[in-house]
Image: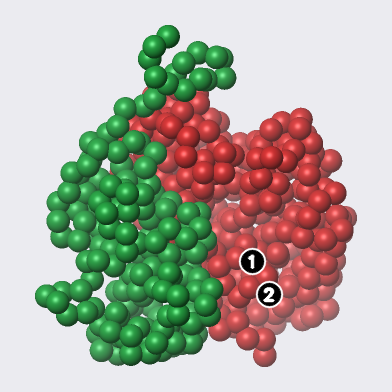
Amino acid sequence: MTQSGITSATGRLAAVPEKIALTLNVNGKRVELRVAPWTTLLDALRDHLDLTGTKKGCDHGQCGACTVLVAGRRINSCLTLAAMQEGNEITTIEGLARDGELHPLQQAFIDHDAFQCGYCTSGQICSAAGLIREGRAKTPDEIRELMSGNICRCGAYPNIVAAIQQAMERS
Amino acid sequence: MIPFQYTRASDVADAIKQIATDPSAKFIAGGTNLLDLIKYDVAAPTRLIDISRLPLRDVEQTATGGLLIGALVPNTDLAYHPLIEERYPLVSRSILAGASQQLRNMASTGGNLVQRTRCFYFYDATTPCNKRQPDSGCSAISGINRGNAILGTSESCIATHPSDMCVALAALEATVHVTGPAGKRTIAIADFHRLPSNTPHQDNNLEPDEIITAIELPPKGFSTNYSYLKIRDRLSYAFALVSVAAALELDGDTIKEARLALGGVAHKPWRNTAAEAALLGQRADAGAFAKAADILLHGAKGFGHNDFKIGLARRAIIRTLDQAARGTPQSISDKKVR
């Protein structure tokens, strides 16, 4: 058999599923791409659209480094398929600054030195943008609870909470 | 990830038709558990049928005064729904005790019911696990079983059901609405999840070609005297070692009705009606709560690392009932013990 494919349990060659054509709306731009059906939104952003600001940490929804906003709501981009997000408005860390001005959260993270290695930072900031939009967190305890999906192994948590408080007050 | 096909269902009937023609296909809604399982080689569907765009996102009042929750209502939307916060705060608190806000934004109400255990060995495809691979053995019974079950276990499996929301649903006697090729049916939440017995690969009584369309809450929400307490290895974003949903109806300090369900201790949300019955007519105090705890935990069995759960569950039951009786439910964000 000359057809390329993968061997199934019965030993027959199964055809590799075809790539699918998708339209996503990323950071205000309409983008078209062809991806394998099993491509996560995270991999589509990083590998197909070259938006590497969104980080792959654990790839299992445990660390929050891949957090992006879909229609303003924060999600883990590693646990959704690009195909499932067709037509949705996606905002990544690259889409937060406006007209050359940092997003208030980006500025607050700098003001408060809210990172060390920086690997979790884009996820932290996107998550915090979602948090502020939700309007559920008011106190530091509530910020910590509702940011618990973002792990910082450098342990910059106190400064992250302070940065979010600053951005929250100014928003 | 392994290769699979991706299709969308146009309506519930189409979803059922698609899954009937392809037994190795799976529905995907939020995807937060299923995609993780595929990445770990625990699930290997040949096709994912995307049901996330089906119109199952409403929360409606029923004619009998209850609430019908569409299966695709995201966990966050349900937890913050005004009718849930006001009339069923136990459901709201239990949802917010689980996962992270990102995951709750994605995860669906129906999917929450059918999420799979987080037993380490179930997730580790290199080890024997009767739930993942029937008749291969159970690695947890003699392995690292700190998170595993103490009630309703079998020689085949000591996995726990990981949901927080389902613990509240069990306490409130919710009903699961499903549709299959033969039509619609309802399943009481108590009959939805199964005990492991010698068929731990079957988590629940949903047929492979059925789809959950809604969850129904009965009129009674116990919105005055309730609490959901979750004990875990870190204060947020971890699965329960033990969790307790308690709901009381009081006449002065006498208990008129009691509901008590536990998470993190069994293959299904664990409710014991004998323990509830023992509370009826009693004064809402530590003595009565301890008696109910002892009835519920009678026959509980540890497997080494999780022996501590029996004592922990006893104290958690007493505390949660006390919080419910006082009308001071466990705070979601302030976990300090006072």
What is the three-letter code of the residue carrying label 2?
Answer: Thr
In the current view of this chain or complex, which residue is farthest to the left? A99
Label 1 is found on which chain of the structure? B
Q: Residue at x 85, y 49 (%)?
A: B142
Q: Which residue is mark 2?
A: B320
Q: In the rendering, at what x and y percent does residue A153 appear?
A: 53, 73
Q: Residue furthest top?
A: A1
| Residue placed most toward the observer, B282 or B327 | B327
Palette colour of chain B: red
**Mark 1 or 2 closer to N-term?**
1
Q: Give the x, y percent position of residue B61.
A: 38, 56
Q: Position of residue B99 (x, y in %)?
A: 52, 63
Residue B212 vertical position relative to residue A53 in the rendered view, above or below: above
Which of the pair A67/A2 is nearer the observer?
A2
The x and y percentages for residue B128 are 74, 38
Report the disc number at residue B245: 1
Chain represented in green: A
Above or below for A32 versus B289:
above
Q: Quadrant of residue A123?
A: bottom left
Q: Are marks 1 and 2 in contact (CB under 8 Å)?
A: yes
Give the chain of mark 2.
B
**What is the spatial separation of the Cα atoms under label 1 and label 2, in whole angstroms?**
7 Å
Residue at image point 52% right, 61% down: A62
Asked which quadrant contains residue B252, the reply is bottom right
Q: Indicate left or right for B299 with B233 as reference.
A: right
Residue at left 64%, top 46%?
B123
Q: Which element carries disc 2, helix, strand or loop?
A: helix
Name which residue lies at 46% across and 28% down: B46
Density class for disc 1 (Cα within 10 Å; few <14, some 14-19, many ≥20) is many
B209 is higher (above) or lower (below) than B188: above
